[in-house]
Amino acid sequence: MSTPVERLFMLFDRTATLLQEELKCSYLEAVAETGENLFHGDVLQEEVSELSQKRLKKEYKDIQLETFTNEEIRKSFQLAVLKGMKENTQPHHQMTPDAVSLFISYLVGKFTAKHLALTILDPAVGTANLLTTVLNHLPGKQVKSYGVDVDDLLIKLAYVNANLQKHPIQFFNQDSLQPMFVEHADVVVCDLPVGYYPHDENASRFALKAEKGHSYAHHLFIEQSLSYTKEGGYLFFLIPNSLFSSDQAAELHSFLKEQAVIQGLLQLPLSMFKNAQAAKSIFILQKKGANVKAPKKALLAELPRFSNKQAMQVMMQKIDEWFASEKN
């Protein structure tokens, strides 16, 4: 017997493959098209032949979307997107690993336990996998959320992904380092795009611009995120481990000291990455504000492998103890 995630993935895969042939487009584009069809329960593309329309309509009819949980929908859609990304390898099309998204969701829940309502922003939303994972793990809260990305295909996939999970996220297809039309957020989650930002003129508006040459996009994203966060709001970044050892680390350090307090730095297991250079950590900041106090001791840890349940339980216990001593 196949699992619900496998059943739904097979549907996405079969129908996307059919649409890819019919529309002469990439598999990834076809995944967005079939997701939209499934949401509407119809075939929206006029150029699809009559025979294929019949086949597709039968496929969509045979699956009852409301019988699947949001997490089952998210995971099956993610599998189809990952398949498309492998075929169409563009370096900036990288999806946040599932275990990491789930762990960030857990942290967001812990830090915002007392909030009844939240505004969440992901300024590098990609296909909205990280953002919808977080939303799926915030039961009982009123949440408004925003996603911004410069890549139009990723934004389309994000929009379809959110629709299928019935998350009313507002998406903006733009360069996130330009002024954004979003509300200030209580929480920012972001898998930081790492590399150089090509638009020097726009970068010159930022405190963290490079003195000469291109600025680091990941530095500018941190600054931009902070300027769109409410006082006392939390920011959860996935950062490269090299963030504080780069040639511009000193400027970043003094900027953060001025603007935020560091709540935690959790190093992800090295086994998750192809090599040590690619390794990342979860960096937790709180924007300074009237009632914001720096923790007596920041939450610092090296996380065990997520598959090691026993070690993870011990780690969760340590995190719980840190919260009990720092947040009460």
Image (spheres, rainbow, N blue to C red):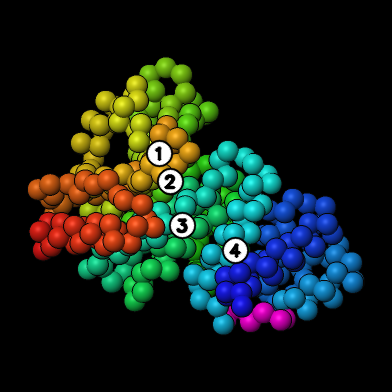
Specify which label sits upstream in the sequence, 2 or 1: 2
Which residue is more in the foreground, 243 or 186? 243
SS assignment at label 4: helix
Q: Is residue 63 magenta?
A: yes
Visible residue check, residue 283: no
Instruction: Evaluate if marks 1 and 3 touch, with contact meaning CB atoms under 8 Å apart.
Output: no
Specify which label sits upstream in the sequence, 1 or 4: 4
Q: Is residue 62 above or below residue 104?
A: below
Query: Label 3: which residue?
Result: 98
Per the model, the C-alpha gap separating discs 2 and 4 is 22 Å
Amino acid type, callout 4: Phe
Check residue 272 in the rendering and tell me which mark sits there, or answer none. Answer: 2
Query: Label 1: which residue?
Result: 279
Residue found at x 27% / y 54%: 233
Which of label 3 and label 4 is nearer to you?
3
Specify which label sits upstream in the sequence, 1 or 3: 3
